[in-house]
Amino acid sequence: MTPEERERRIREIAERLAQRLDEAWPEGHLTVNAIEDLAERLGHEVQREFTERFLREAAERKDGLQTRCPCGGAVIYWGTTR
C-alpha cells in the first residue's frame, strides 16, 4: 500500500465515522449511559467494517498467486475458506 492509498483509506474511514455519528447522535442532552451505548454501537460497526474491508482486500491480493508444488506442478491460491 502506498502512503497515498493509506492516507485515502484513513480519510474514508474518518468520513464514514463522522457520517454515522451525525446520523446516530440524538438531539438534546445525553446521559452517560446513552453516550456509552452510542460509542459502543458505533465502535462495533467501525470495527466490523474495517475488518471486513481489510480482510477482503487481503484475500483479493492473494487470488491468482501461484507457486510450485513439491511434485513440480503449479499450486494456485484460491482464497480463504471459513
Image (cartoon, grey):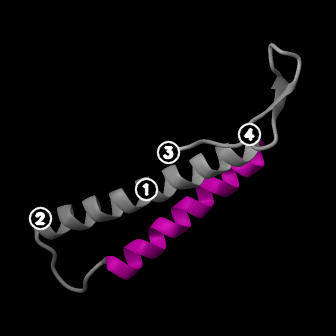
The crowding category of the residue bearing disc 1, from other C-alpha atoms within 10 Å (few below 14, some 14 to 19, many at least 20), is few
Mainly helix, strand or loop, the magenta region?
helix
What residue is drawn where x is 78% and y is 42%? 2
Of marks 4 and 1, which one's residue comes earlier in the chain? 1
Give the amino acid at mark 3. Answer: Arg
Can you give x and y, in whole percent of width and height, for residue 75 in the image?
80, 29
Q: Between marks 3 and 4, how big is the CA–CA gap?
A: 16 Å
Query: Is residue 37 toward the left or the right of residue 72 in the image?
Result: left
- Residue 76: horizontal and vertical position, in percent? 79, 35
Q: The residue under label 2 is which amino acid type? A: Val
- Name the residue carrying label 3: 82
Which residue is disc 4 drawn over?
62
* Residue holding disc 2: 32
Q: CA distance from mark 2 to mark 3?
A: 39 Å
The magenta segment is 2-24
Tell me which corner region of the image, top left, top right, bottom left or bottom right, holds residue 80: top right
* Helix, strand or loop status at disc 1: helix
Which label is found at residue 48? 1
Classify mark 3: helix, strand or loop.
loop
Q: CA distance from mark 1 to mark 3?
A: 17 Å
Above or below, comparing residue 31 to residue 72 in the picture: below
